[in-house]
Amino acid sequence: METTAVRRRLTWQAAAVTSIARETASVVTIELEPPDWPGHLAGQHLDVRLTAEDGYTAERSYSIASAPNEQLAITVERLENGEVSPYLTEELRAGDQLELRGPIGGYFVWEPTDDSPLMLIAGGSGVVPLRSMLRHRLRAGSDVPARLLYSSRTLPDVIYRGELDQYGDGVRVICTLTRSQPPGWTGYSGRVNTAMLAETVWPASQHPLAFVCGPTTFVEAVAENLIGLGYPSERIKTERFGGT
Amino acid sequence: MDAVDGNAIGGLLIDVFGTEMTAANSTCGTCGTGRPVAELVVYRRAPGTVVRCRTCGSVLMVFVKVHGVTCVDLDGLASLSQLVARGDS
């Protein structure tokens, strides 16, 4: 299509909220229908802008949770004392309008044309752009082997839990719970560390491509460990979203 | 305030440069280290955004928005180069 070949400047638009689904006690997935959306790549984000009655505005970036060619969706975690996320997770309703612009980002993106084993590593809501990649992999019929190492505080904090249980062929999902584990838990316990990474990630000899997303301290620690395991820095793509 | 990284200012960079810049390569003017803009250290504290080198900590870029106008200081960069992206021609 001609329209997608021409790069446009980013413009704000009012998208219709078509549904809101609760993922965990503090996390929701919001489906959106923007009037003019050029399509996105797995891993990209969009900016949301809220405007108060007095004209005060607050902008935040949210990773896109849906695969390209699916209905656009973002997954938002409520941050205590946040300016935007409490509204998005508690007040927003289907049928409302939400001002957004995007898609944004060209670095932290995965395309099925890359045939390297895919190593996805997430802390908390850092799983959101990686979920877009897994869905894209599935929908695109890619047979690239993928692993997701996902760190959460507790089992009820695991976002997309039901969906992650269902990824079958070619995808291995490895969870670790840092704060508490339910009886009979067979996954990992505790924070992602050197030993856990050495056991779970693709060996560097297989030339994997790694995407690491989460709180800044989490991403720094994981990236440093991957380099220690022989991953070249240019094969580790990182996205840090600040404090926990 | 916690640091984020260059991914977080993708929208701001499109405002300023008119194109996707997070995958662009940057070279620090102080230590000479090159890395993608996405991997730089970013502090966002309204009204300004400060971008620092992840190797030596030098300030590479500063963006300040005043009355709807974004003032840009790129003095700390030795270079900023954007590959021609797919679809641009």
Image: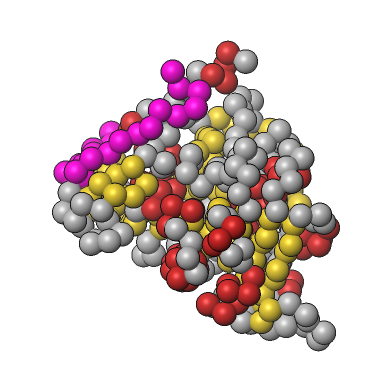
Q: Is residue A204 magenta?
A: no
Q: Nearer the viewer, residue A43 or A232?
A: A232
Residue A89 location (% of width, % of height):
65, 55
Q: Is residue B80 magenta?
A: yes
Residue B70 location (% of width, % of height):
28, 36
Residue A169 location (% of width, % of height):
81, 54
Q: Residue furthest front?
A: A205
Q: Nearer the viewer, residue A16 or A169?
A: A169
Count of numbered labels shown in the rendering: 0
Residue B5 location (% of width, % of height):
40, 54
Q: Is residue A74 left or right of residue A83?
A: right
Q: Is residue A37 left or right of residue B88?
A: right
From the viewer's perspective, is residue A94 above or below residue A127? above
Task: Tell me what residue is drawn at x 64 percent, y 70 percent.
Answer: A200
Q: Which residues are magenta?
A: B67-89
Task: Tell me what residue is drawn at x 62 percent, y 37 percent.
Answer: A113
Q: Is residue A69 left or right of residue B47?
A: right
Residue A146: image quadrant is: bottom right
Report if residue A178 is visible in the image.
yes
Report if residue A55 is visible in the image.
no
Q: Nearer the viewer, residue A149 or A197?
A: A197
Q: Quadrant of the N terminus of chain A?
A: top right
From the viewer's perspective, is residue A155 above or below residue A183? above
Q: Is residue A205 left or right of residue A66?
A: left
Task: Tell me what residue is drawn at x 48 percent, y 61 percent.
Answer: A231
Q: Nearer the viewer, residue B60 or A114?
A: A114
Look at the image and name its color scheme: secondary structure
Q: Residue furthest top?
A: A2
From the viewer's perspective, is residue B14 above or below residue A90? above
Residue A161: image quadrant is: bottom right
